[in-house]
Image (cartoon, helix red, strand yellow):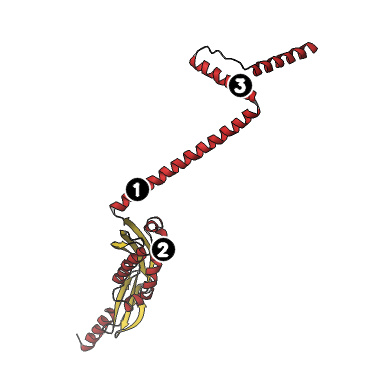
Amino acid sequence: MTNSQIVILIIVVFLLSGIRIVNEYVRSVVFRLGRFKRIAGPGLYWIIPLIEWQKTIDMRTRTVTVERQETITKDSVTVKVDAVLWYRVIDAAKSVIAVENYGLAVHQVALTSLRNIIGQHLLDEVLKDRNTINQSLREIVDSATEAWGVKIEMVEMKDVEIPEAMQRAMAREAEAVREKRARLIKAEAEQEAASKLSDGARQISENPIALELRRMQMIAEVGAEQNTTTIVLMPSDFVNLAGEFAAMLHRKAKDN
C-alpha cells in the first residue's frame, strides 16, 4: 500500500468517525473546543472528530416519584405526603449548560416545593383541594426549572397519611355531622307535621260538624279493623242538623 493510499484511508476513517445517528426523540448538544456550537439531530449528522464532542438529551416526558415527605400543615398537623412528577426537556442546550444534572435538580426542587406548599395549607385543604394544590405546586416547580430548559407538565399528590389520632378525631367529627343532619331532618318533619295539624285544627274550629264527621269515620275504621260492634252517642247538634236536612229533602220531594 502506497503512502497516498494510506493517507486516503486515514482521511476516510477520520470522516466516518464523525458520523452520528440519533433517534427522533433525541437531540445532541454539540460543543467545539469546549464552546457550545449547535443542536444536532434527529437522524444523521456529522461532527468534526477530535475537535467537536456531543451530549445527547432525551426529549421525551419523564416520570419522577417524589418520595414520601413528613411535613407540618398550617394548622400544625404532621402529615406524610408523596407525589408524582411529569416533566420533559424543551431546550436541550440549557439542560446541559445551565445545570449539571437536570434530573436530580428537578427532583430536589420538587421535594422542597412539596414541603413548602403543604406548610401553607390547612389539613382540610390538603385533603379536599388537591387539584388546587397540585396546580400551585406545578407552577412553583415549573418557574424554578424554566431556566434549565425543563417543562413541568403535571404534578399529582399520590397519598396523604395523617396520624391515627387525627383519623379517629375526623371520624368522630364526621359521625357528629351525620347525626346533626339526621336531627335537622327529623325536626323539619315534625315542624311540617305540626303545621299541618295546626291548619287542620283551624279548619275544624271553623266548622264543628267536620270534627264530628271525622270522629265517626275514625270510630267506623276502628270497628272494621277490630271486627266489633260500636255504640256511638251522637251529639244533639249533629242529630238536629241531620233531622233538618232530612226534612228539607222530604219537602223538596213532596213539592216535586
Instruction: Say above or below: 250 vs 204.
Output: above
Q: Are marks 2 and 3 in contact (CB under 8 Å)?
A: no
What label does residue 171 carry, if any?
Answer: 1
Say left or right for 139 vs 107: right
Viewport quadrant of the C terminus: top right
What label does residue 135 carry, if any?
Answer: 2
Residue 221, quarter of the rendered image: top right
Q: Position of residue 198 (x, y in %)?
A: 58, 33
Q: Does residue 46 show up? A: no
Which amino acid type is shown beneath numbered disc 3? Answer: Glu
Say left or right for 56 vs 143: left
Q: Residue at x 55, y 12 (%)?
A: 231
Sequence-wise, the earlier of marks 2 and 1 is 2
| Furthest residue in direction right, as rendered | 255
Sequence-wise, the earlier of marks 2 and 3 is 2
Residues 127 and 172: in front is 172
Q: Which residue is mark 3?
A: 212
Q: Residue at x 63, y 29 (%)?
A: 205
Which amino acid type is shown beneath numbered disc 1? Answer: Ala
Which amino acid type is shown beneath numbered disc 2? Answer: Gln
